[in-house]
Amino acid sequence: MVTAQQKTAILVKTEPGVKLFLNDSLVGKIENNQKDLIIKGVLPGKQKLLLVKKGTLPQYYDIYVTAGEVSVVNAKPFIKDAEKQKHNKPSATEISSKPEPLDSNRAKIFLFSEVAIKLGSQNPKFGVQMGIILTKPISEILLSGIGSGYRSNLGTGDYSVPLFADLRYHIARKNIIINSQIGTNFNKSSYYKNSYFAAVGINYKIWKTMNNLYPSLRVGINLEFNHTPFYESFNDIILHNGYLQQLMLGGKVSFPIHFNTKRK
C-alpha cells in the first residue's frame, strides 16, 4: 500500500484556460489569472498527462514521478487548431487515447440497454429483466437518469414492469461503472405483489469503438433487495409466493449508446 508520504505531486506550467487530464481523468483547469497548477496526491511511477485548450491542438506528456518529489512540466506553446488542417492530421493513437468527457458535445444523452439474469433468496428464485435507462451527465464521471423495462419471474408466469431512478459513477478511466437504482416494481399478475426495490451493481467495459465512443459492451453483477409493503394485510399471499423480502444476486450485460447533439 502506498502511504501518504510516498505520494508526490506534479507542477504544470502552461497557459490560462487549459484543462489538465491525468491518466484520462480531469484533475483541474488553469484559470485566466493563472499560469500554473499543481496536481497533488499523485502515485509514484509513470503517469500520462494531457493538456487541452479550446481551439488548439492537445499536448501529451509521459512523466515518471518519484515518491516525495515534485515533478515540473513546462508545457510548449499551444498551436491553433486551424494549423492542424495545414500541417498535421491526428494519428489513430492520438484519436483513441483522447478522453471523451461525459459533459462534452459528443455525449449529451446516454441510453443504456441492459439484460440481467437474477437468482433470488425466495420463490421465485429465478428471473430475467430487460431494461432501458436514459441518463444525462451531471459531471465528468457522474450520470443520473430514469429507467423502465420488463421483468419476468421464470417458472411462475409472473411478469412486472419496473420504474426506477438510476445513478452511475465512472472510475478507472471510465472502464468501470458503479451504478445504483431505487424504484417501484408494478406486478401485472397480482396488484398485491407490487413492490419497491433498491439495487447496486458494477460492470466493466470489455469492448469499445474507436475514439472511446459508444456503443460499447459491458458485463457485470447486480445485487437487489426487493420488498412488498402489503405484507400486513396480505401476509398469506405474499409469504406463499416469496415476495415478503427478496434478496437477488445476478449477472447483467449492458450495451450503452450515446446520442450526438453536436459535432465540431
Image (cartoon, grey):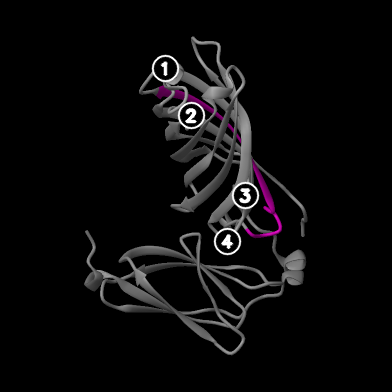
What residue would you read off at disc 4?
Answer: 139
What kind of residue is marked 3? Answer: Asn
- Residue 244, how many percent across, how many down? 41, 26
Is label 1 in contact with label 4 (beta carbons under 8 Å)? no
Distance Cα–Cα, label 2 vs label 4: 39 Å
Drawn side of residue 174 relative to residue 148, left or right: left
Q: Which numbered disc flags the more N-terminal residue, 1 or 4?
A: 4
Q: Which mark is residue 211?
A: 3
Mark 3 vs mark 1: which is more N-terminal?
3
Disc marking residue 236:
1
Q: Earlier in the sequence, mark 1 or mark 2?
A: 2
**Circle 4: is it few (<14), some (14-19), or many (20+) Cα within 10 Å?**
few
Quarter of the picture holding the C terminus:
bottom right
Q: Residues within 10 Å of mark 1 (few under 14, many from 20)?
A: few
**Residues under labels 1 and 2: Cα distance?**
11 Å
Which residues lie in the magenta part? 103-119
Residue 160: x, y in percent?
59, 23
Asked if the magenta segment contains residue 112, the reply would be yes
Q: Which mark is residue 30?
A: none
